[in-house]
Amino acid sequence: MKRMVTWILSLKGDSAASDTPKAKGKEYTYTLKDGKTVKLEFPLFVEGSTEKVTKDVFRGYELFNSYCFRCHGQDVTESELAPDLKRSIESGLTPQDFVATTMAGRDAKGMPSWAGFLTEEEVRKILMYVQGRTLDLIPVGRPPSEAE
């Protein structure tokens, strides 16, 4: 099953259509604590707020807090059980690799396959939360959401 998931996810990057330029979606610019700016392809915060995260990012927090924190650390902090996701993203882990690894798992490292349990959309929401934490834009703890 893992090979099938990996193969399916790999098709996105191997198609002939990938040679054609993709239309750029909306980008969201955020200023980091050091004054640098970053652009993301998704909104972290509700428009007009720098504290309340979007429903998608909050759902990513809920999923991470339910399934991922045991191995990857509370609030996407280091852990002795699994790789530091902040460091992985800072080192160039792509969104496609994040999704593929999460869905297929890594038996040799003790990571289960989440395919069939989490959807690709849910994994992308987890990634949104992880990216926000990696950039230190989302503070430690339960982030306030637009639903509140």
Image (cartoon, helix red, strand yellow):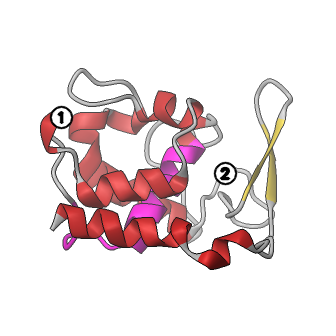
Query: Can you tell which quarter of the image residue 104 is in?
Result: bottom left
Give the magenta part as a residue range. Answer: 114-132
The residue nearer to you, when weighing 89 against 78, is 89
Q: Which residue is mark 1?
A: 109
Mark 2 vs mark 1, CA separation in Å: 36 Å
Q: Is 33 covered by the magenta stretch?
A: no
- Magenta includes 115? yes
Residue 22 in percent (x, y) is at 76, 73
Residue 141, quarter of picture: top left
Crowd tier of the residue under label 2, counting other residues whose Cα lies within 10 Å: few below 14, some 14–19, many 20 or above: some
Name the one closer to the observer, 19 or 96. 19
Picture residue at 31% right of the left edge, 54% below the top: 102
Relative to 91, residue 69 above or below: below
Q: How many neighbours does mark 1 have within 10 angstroms: few (below 14), some (14-19), or many (20 or more)?
A: few
The circle on residue 120 is none
Disc sitting over residue 51 in the figure = 2
Q: What is the three-letter code of the residue carrying label 1?
A: Lys
Q: Point out the image quarter for the N terminus.
A: bottom left
Residue 141 visible from this viewpoint: yes
Q: Which element carries disc 1, helix, strand or loop?
A: helix
Q: On screen, 148 above or below 130?
A: below
Q: Amino acid at mark 2?
A: Glu
Residue 70 screen position, x and y as percent: 21, 38
Q: Main secondary structure of the magenta part?
A: helix
Q: Looking at this view, is 143 or 21 the one in front?
A: 21
Question: Which residue is found at the position 18% from the left and 34% from the top?
Answer: 109
Which of discs 2 and 1 lies nearer the camera? The answer is 1
- SS of the residue under disc 2: loop
